Every structure is written in structure tokens, then in C-alpha cells.
Image: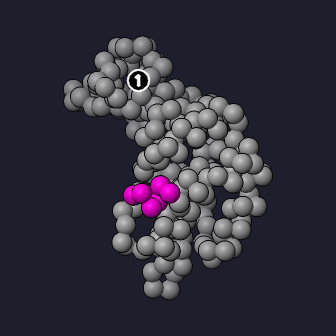
Amino acid sequence: MPEQAAPVIAKWIDYFQCEFKISKSRSTKLGDYRHPFRQTGHQISVNNNLNRYAFLVTTVHEFAHLLTWNEFQHKVKPHGAEWKSNYKKMMIPFLEQRVFPEDLERAISTYLTNPSASSCTDLHLSRALKKYDSSGDHTRLEELDTHTVFRIKDGRRFKKGERLRKRYRCECLDNGNIYLFSPLAEVFVAETGT
């Protein structure tokens, strides 16, 4: 995470007596919060493959769950108004400290008007965060031309189709089925002849 954010997060870990884990990459989630149960206390885990800004945004997201649990337990929705209020409140110190680059700070400020269950579902914020990822051999689906053949991590090959509102309609070349992909899906351009 950004260096100047670490003391605030360390205080939260200590204050809430939270077990904070950096976990291996999970494809289904960026982070996780588990409320106290039997002999365990609060537990937060955040994926290790996130860039430092995405790591901080995810960490604040999970701590907002912890605070909401302490205040309401099971009486409110996980991403309801109470969580949104706590998320905004917990993000303020990092915006005041100017922890984020200017473009990311603007995207986060816009996102804070109505935070969603995942920063990934806000395309503007997700794009801004992904700019700080170390570039690998993947690209975002939205950057490919229509009819480009690409593959995903599990090896399946697809042909990019037209955009339907928020997602792209893509045909799986291995089984002929149609799938809808987020514009920000990380894909690999298939080599010619594959």
C-alpha cells in the first residue's frame, strides 16, 4: 500500500484487534471480511497481487465491513447505507493526506457518492486503478477490435462481439456458446492460427 497510508491501517488493526492477512490471488474476490465467531476475532484478507492503490481501496472496503459489523451486526445489508457511510468516513483520511495520484483521487471521490459492493463494478474507478497495475502479457477486452480472437486464463478461446449495454457478447470458439464479458476483463490476444 502507499507508505503514508500504512500508519492509519496499522492503527485500525490494533484498535479493532483484527487479524489482517495478505492472501494469494483469488479470482472471485479482491478481499474478504469475517466477523468474530466462536474463538476467532475479526479477520480481513486482501489479495497480494493488487497494485498498492487497489490494495488500499480494498483494505478500506473490508475495514468498513468490520466497523459496520461492530455497529449493527446482522441487522443491516452487507453493502447497505450503513456500510456506504462507513466506507466514505474511513476513506477520508487518505483523501486528506493526498495518498492517491490526482486522477485516482478524482475517480475515488466520484465513486464515494454511491459506493458499490465492489470497486470492480464501477468502471471509471476500476479503469483508474488498473492504470497502476504492472503490465503483463494481458490486455483489457475493451482495447481489442471487434472479431479479435482472445483467450482467458483457463485457455478457452473467444471471438469478441458487439457491446450490449455494459458487456461484450463473445463467442467461445471451443464450444460455440455465447458469454458476456466485462469491458475490463483481462484477456490474452490469441496468436494467429491458434
Q: Quadrant of residue 155?
A: top left
Who's the residue at 62% across and 74% down the image?
16
Pick the front one: 28 or 95:
95
Q: Which residues are magenta?
A: 80-85
Magenta segment's dominant SS is helix
Say left or right for 178 vs 57: left
Say left or right for 103 vs 43: right
Who's the residue at 73% across and 54% down the image?
5
Say left or right for 9 vs 158: right
Where residue 73 appears, as percent x and y from the top left, is: 42, 74
Pick the front one: 17 or 87:
87
Q: Is residue 29 magenta?
A: no
Who's the residue at 69% across and 41% down the image?
100
Q: Is residue 119 visible?
A: no
Who's the residue at 39% across and 58% down the image?
80
Residue underneath mark 1: 150
Where residue 21 appears, as percent x and y from the top left, is: 60, 64
Indicate the secondary structure of the residue bearing disc 1. strand
Where residue 175 appears, as percent x and y from the top left, is: 23, 30
Q: Quadrant of residue 153?
A: top left
Three-letter residue code for mark 1:
Phe
Where residue 97 appears, as percent x and y from the top left, is: 75, 48
Question: Vertically, is 8 above or below 58?
Answer: below
Question: Vertically, is 72 above or below 94?
Answer: below
Q: Is residue 10 visible?
A: yes
Disc 1 packing (10 Å; few <14; some 14–19; many ≥20): many
Question: Vertically, is 73 above or below 89?
Answer: below
In which quadrant is the C terminus drawn?
top left
